[in-house]
Each structure stands twice: as C-alpha cells, then as structure tokens.
Image (cartoon, rainbow, N blue to C red):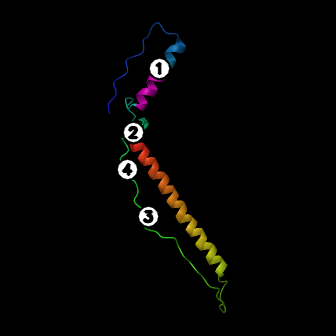
Amino acid sequence: MAFAALPGIPQSGLSPVEFQLFASVKENIEQLTGQSGVPQLRAVLTGQVGVVPIEDLNSKPVSITGASYIITGGGPVPSQEDFVSLATTVQQLVYDVQLLRDTLNTLIIQLRG
C-alpha cells in the first residue's frame, strides 16, 4: 500500500509552538507510512503479516512414572514422588507452550486481517 507524500509545513504564519507541533506530527506520519527512509519504523498494516500460523504440536501429555531404588555405594536416587512432580511440571510446560502458541496464532490472524 502506498501513501501520498505529505506537503511541507508553511514557514510563515505559524508560531514556533505550532510549527514544532506540525513538524512532529508530520515526522510521525512519515515514519508510520514508511516515508522517512527508516523502514524499521514503518507501521504494520492489516494484511501485511506474511507469517503462517503454527501447525498443531505433535507432542502428547507426558506420562512419567518412577520407582524408588536402593543402591549400594551410590548416591541418592530420586523417589517416586520426585518423578511424579517432574511429570506434572513437564505436563504443565506442554500446556503452557500450547497456550502461548494459541495466543500467537490469534495475534497473527488478527494482524493478517
């Protein structure tokens, strides 16, 4: 989408405050429309987002079970409670990633228009 160039600001008939106000507004509009020569400042418009929404994740909820082991001459071995806690944490992480993915897809869809 192309935007028409903004006309110059009149050099006479404006107070210094008015001139500064119009100059600032003009500069902001030129940045948002990509006319300032700094493409990183250009606004993203509806329909300009070219990112495709992420497909469904292939991961499944994790099911981890553990058992307590007694070893001779070795260090401590995590208990079953520790393994269950790990499984709960990993499952929550999977759900959190899914939530973030859904949020990102919603944003992409809204920006795409």
In whole angstroms, how far apart are the C-alphas of marks 3 and 1? 49 Å
Type of amino acid at the residue the image marks with label 4: Val
Q: Residue at 58% across / 80% down in the picture?
A: 65
Find the magenta span and give its range: 25-32
The quadrant the N terminus occupies is top left
Position of 106 relative to 65 (above/below): above
Q: Residue at 56% across / 77% down in the picture?
A: 64
Q: Position of residue 85 (x, y in %)?
A: 63, 73
- Tell which of 68 and 103 is nearer to you: 103
Q: Position of residue 12 (x, y in %)?
A: 45, 7
- Quick check: can you spot residue 78? no
Q: Residue furthest left?
A: 2
Residue mark closest to the camera, 1 vs 4: 4
Position of 14 relative to 93 (above/below): above
Picture disc at residue 51: 4
In whole angstroms, how far apart are the C-alphas of marks 2 and 3? 27 Å
Report crowding for label 3: few under 14, some 14 to 19, many 20 or more residues within 10 A (C-alpha). few
In whole angstroms, how far apart are the C-alphas of marks 4 and 3? 17 Å
Which residue was labeled with disc 3? 57
Which residue was labeled with disc 1? 23
In whole angstroms, how far apart are the C-alphas of marks 2 and 4? 13 Å
Q: Residue furthest bottom?
A: 72
Contact (Cβ within 8 Å) of mark 4 with mark 3: no
Q: Main secondary structure of the magenta part?
A: helix
In the structure shown, which secondary structural element does the residue marked by tag 3 occupy? loop
- Tell which of 73 and 104 is nearer to you: 104
